[in-house]
Image (cartoon, helix red, strand yellow):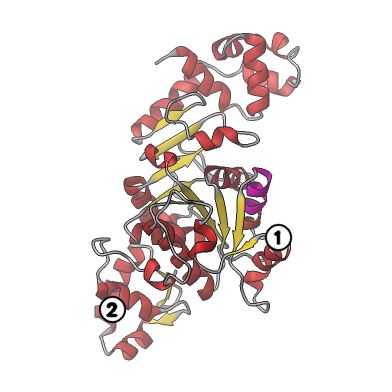
Amino acid sequence: MDQERVAYVALALTPGVGTARLGTLLAACGSAHGALSAPSAFLRTVPGISLALATAIAQRTLADGERALAEVERLGGLALVPGDDRFPPTLGQIPEPPTLLFALGDLSLADRPMVAIVGSRDHSAYGAAACRLIAGAVARAGGVVVSGMARGLDAVAHRAALDADGTTIGVLGNGLGVVYPTANRALYDAVAARGLLLTEFPPGERPNAGSFPRRNRLISGLAKATVLVEAALGSGALITAGCALEQGREVLAVPGPITSRTSAGTNRLIRDGATPLLEPADLFHHYPELAVVAPGTDWEALGRPMPGSGLGAEAMALADAVGFDPIHVDALADRLGRSAGELLGALCALELAGLVEQQAGGRFRRV
């Protein structure tokens, strides 16, 4: 391995070494290898480097960088540093750009028009339906859907893009090789195979409370526009919208009922100046490079899976029959005139495809 690159990775993964401090260290020491080799006494003289951080850097070795690079290679991914040809160009333009990225999948997607779509983990049926329609429209127009691989509307956005025979980028709040939440295993594998997974965190690192705000700035930073589908006040999705505004990106929000808790955040964004997203034209005039989607276009048609997406009409009909309100498999069997045993196999397949989730007591709901 190139020792300078290995040293850079070890340095960039040191807690407390962000973009500004890394630049200061490289300028003071001449190289990453020089910074990694410098004694703690010298590091303490570098502006912005505290005693604790100097001690942490002095304890870093090339072996730390080698382990991270070897593990990402074992997983089939690679590490990217600023200046690499395949480093996503939009992320170099944001405040506090990432010093290091780990990627798994098709890196060429970061050169295509990207739309960030985010929303609450605890969403309504309306939010899930709107999310599927918007992500399906983006995918069919040739755009790449970017979201955060979380439970709820993030997962709906990723799956809808894949169902529409499009593609998607999942930005993780943890390292490659860690599936969080565990229910997203099938989605993680699908995005890795047909899209792209990106993260700042080293392979194997578990998420923590601070991981997700850091992830959110990358979600909005990748895309020209961020769409907030549904979010209660205090939702983490509002952090992504705030990041987009700080980055000079467009923010659009889907309006919802004023009586709905899960639309309180999006409605307030609209009141405060965000563009209301009522039809595809509201989004796509920011993306003239995408296929034209005229005013009045049928959103529902855009959200349906395309032929060849791997989901047949019968499977989609069953998913629609499940609906967004939890229903017991026996009640669904009575409604459809089929046996519960027959339905369970089909429902498990839909669960693996990310279209329904099983809840306690034999209940299922659409996601």
Does any portion of residue 72 appear in the rendered image? Answer: yes
Assess disc 1: are there few (<14), some (14-19) or many (≥20) residues with their C-alpha within 10 Å of its C-alpha: few
Kind of residue sitting beneath label 1: Gly
Kind of residue sitting beneath label 2: Leu
Instruction: Identify the magenta region.
Output: 239-247
Horizontal side of 309 relative to 184 (left or right) equals left
The reply to whether the C-beta atoms of the residues labelled 2 and 1 are less than 8 Å apart is: no
Does any portion of residue 151 appear in the rendered image? Answer: no
Horizontal side of 168 relative to 46 (left or right) equals left
Q: Which element type, helix, strand or loop, lies under badge 1?
A: loop
Location of mark 2 (residue): 343
Q: Earlier in the sequence, mark 2 or mark 1?
A: 1
> Residue at image x 66%, y 29%?
16
Gap in Å between the C-alphas at discs 2 and 1?
A: 46 Å
> Residue at image x 54%, y 11%?
33
Q: Nearer the viewer, residue 124 or 292?
A: 292
Residue 3, x across and y down, in percent: 46, 13
Check the picture and name the quadrant holding the N terminus. Answer: top left
Q: Nearer the viewer, residue 10 or 99?
A: 99
Residue 223, x across and y down, in percent: 53, 46
Looking at the image, is 340 positioned above or below residue 176? below
Location of mark 1 (residue): 273
Looking at the image, is 76 positioned above or below residue 181? above
Residue 76, x across and y down, in percent: 33, 35
Q: Which element type, helix, strand or loop, lies under badge 2?
A: helix
